[in-house]
Amino acid sequence: MEFKVNSKELEKLLGKIIPAVPTRTPMPILENFLFEVKDGLLTIYATDLEISLKSSLSIATEDNVKLVVPARLLNDIVRSLSDTTIHFKLTSNKKINLITDTGKYVISYLNPDEFPDIPSVTEDKDVKDINEVVINGVELKQAFEKTSFAMSKEEMRPAMMGTLFEFTDDGLRFVTTDGHRLVNMLKKNIKANFNQQYVVPERAVSVLLKILDEKDVKIYLTKSYVSFKLNDIELITRLIAQKYPDYNSVIPLENEFALKINTKDIHNSIKRMMLFSTSTTRRVKFSIKKESLEISAEDLDIGASGEEKVVCEYSGDDLEIGFNSAYVNDVLNHMSDNEEIIFKLHSPTKAVIIEPVVKKENQDLMMLLMPVRLNT
Amino acid sequence: MEFKVNSKELEKLLGKIIPAVPTRTPMPILENFLFEVKDGLLTIYATDLEISLKSSLSIATEDNVKLVVPARLLNDIVRSLSDTTIHFKLTSNKKINLITDTGKYVISYLNPDEFPDIPSVTEDKDVKDINEVVINGVELKQAFEKTSFAMSKEEMRPAMMGTLFEFTDDGLRFVTTDGHRLVNMLKKNIKANFNQQYVVPERAVSVLLKILDEKDVKIYLTKSYVSFKLNDIELITRLIAQKYPDYNSVIPLENEFALKINTKDIHNSIKRMMLFSTSTTRRVKFSIKKESLEISAEDLDIGASGEEKVVCEYSGDDLEIGFNSAYVNDVLNHMSDNEEIIFKLHSPTKAVIIEPVVKKENQDLMMLLMPVRLNT
């Protein structure tokens, strides 16, 4: 069994698949690629049991074979080679020889039977009720970039460890929350012929963020799995099998006080206040009066404090409200620095809504922040 | 007591001094700057007891004062401000108020008596026998860049944890070694009116690498301390009070076999071999014949190996010799990729000399590498 492949083509392919290889795993077999050579096509798979990536490359060979090869070592070898032809040759003692014009590298391979099955969403004829939708890669990437930060890291509520994809008549809604903050982004121009909720796990989102480009993505959704088909690569992920919390119930409707402010101004101020809000509460205080927002923080341990005035427009009653400064910073990191935003408030204990003043076409973006108590 | 200072000027000043502030120290006082305001000059000091940095800035004030202020917090606050005037105001309760147009920041200060004394090399009239020399900043930086990697991290032999400055009639020689490799660089154009050895500790070298620029450096050397005076900043370091080992005794004289090779070719090959030389020995084998160098490595634990041929010119007997691949890589990292180098060899157990084929003007550079056994 042997085949030849160009080093740079293989490097590109492996670079796309390796994000699915787990860095620490109790199952060492997952630190490998599955190589499948069939009818002149080399398909490479990797999985961490939650997500799988696969991609293919045409090669000139008559043989069909399946092998399991050490992922990082092979990736490192191929990346370190200059543009050359690599001649893969299997030897009888479970070794693969990689031969180039100037060198020979030997790695061991394992039995493919030990490698877990990769689920297939589109090719499995037993799977019924597949929903399909096409989303532009840039749009999907932007939606993840704006929303992914608010996913929960707490295993107590598994659904919140993912991103909600909610297909509605109004468009596709992305929701993330960890109970302290929530992001709700509606993409009005992404329409599907079905209404349904899916919860995509964090790891799938973070890997997609690495591999999405400007090309369209075909998405196939079943009850248990979703497949993202990019141009030359497919990511399949388990869906989180828990119902997403009713996010609408936490979005306040009567927040009648409006604070309009330049994002960059308040963001710079919050970054400075984070230097002082270093105690366990990480609290920053907003003292809001007409046309004047005073932001302050205090670190009692080291006897340091800061306070700043930021120009704003405010319509509402005078209000003092506290936030976790890191959470405010997260929200502001995901707003555009050169736009104005509006804080919609009601009282020191009620969730605050933060939105851009000027809405983007086809897009509603709303962030929500829970306040923290001031008198502790 | 109060004074005003521009935020950007202060930011620049603090940025130069903060490298001397230790990151972990059993003496919390060292995590502070010493501020000394005297006759309209603000001088800022930091020290880790081994090295000290100081720099000054003219300010408009009538008062004289000494304060100890938290270094990282102040540096972070000043860096986070836009270009503005900071008004420093001391309050009666051991606080400093930093007031700008839009904000007020309060930090605590400490008693200056607790801050260690900063040694002075040039101003102390008790110090006799000061040697002086001027070196261009770029030349000094290049010498450190080529030599610093080989300093020892082992506390067993303190002298080897520094860089030897050897002033001779031939010029200034820099030597570093950890017993496994040695770098010997002679700068023929740096002449002094004295012949003497000084051992400068690693931390002084690494901080100097950060702050040296194209300007001349005035160096004042005593028996115990050396002062590096850059344009607007002074670094004072303790010298290592141990005699440097006799490096000449380890440099072989009769290495009559010469291997001439392109640096980039062998460097790329070594980087690939490092993927296979991952066991405890990290061994890479050179099999040298006329016009052919074969480099190989083997990782028995994972059953992987690599071998490559690199074009070379060789005059000498056929030879097999082993090296620590990481040490070979270190040496090659400090040769220019686009030049040819020569390995001077004698036998599998004798130190190897590595030099550039074409010498730079006014500069002799020699690296030395101890081989490792092949038959273990």
Image (spheres, coloured by chain):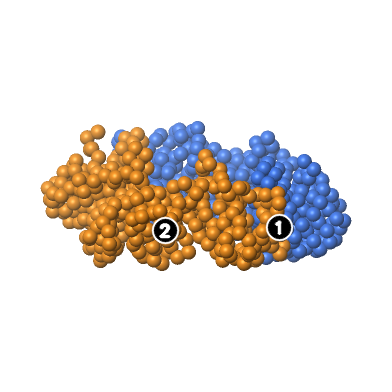
Chain colours: A blue, B orange
Q: Position of residue B111 (x, y in %)?
A: 61, 47
Q: Position of residue A211 (x, y in %)?
A: 53, 53
Vertical placement of A21 versus B85: above or below? above
Seen at 54% across and 38% down, the residue is: A49
Q: Which residue position is annotated with label 2?
A: B122
Seen at 43% across and 56% down, the residue is: B124
| Residue nearer the viewer, A104 or B164 | B164
Q: From this viewpoint, which residue is outermost toward the front?
A: B126
Q: Secondary structure at mark 1?
A: strand
| Residue nearer the viewer, B10 or A65 | B10
Q: Locate residue B180 relative to residue A226 in the image: left or right.
A: left
Say if residue B5 shows up in the picture. Answer: yes
Q: How many marks?
A: 2
Seen at 63% across and 61% down, the residue is: B63
Is the N terminus of chain A in the top left, top right, bottom left or bottom right quadrant? top left
Q: Position of residue A195 (x, y in %)?
A: 73, 49
Between the residue at mark 1 and the residue at mark 2, the CA separation in whole angstroms equals 39 Å
Q: Quadrant of residue B129?
A: bottom left
The numbered dot on residue B104 is: 1
Kind of residue sitting beneath label 1:
Lys
Q: Are marks 1 and 2 in contact (CB under 8 Å)?
A: no
Q: Locate residue A70 relative to residue A180 in the image: left or right.
A: left
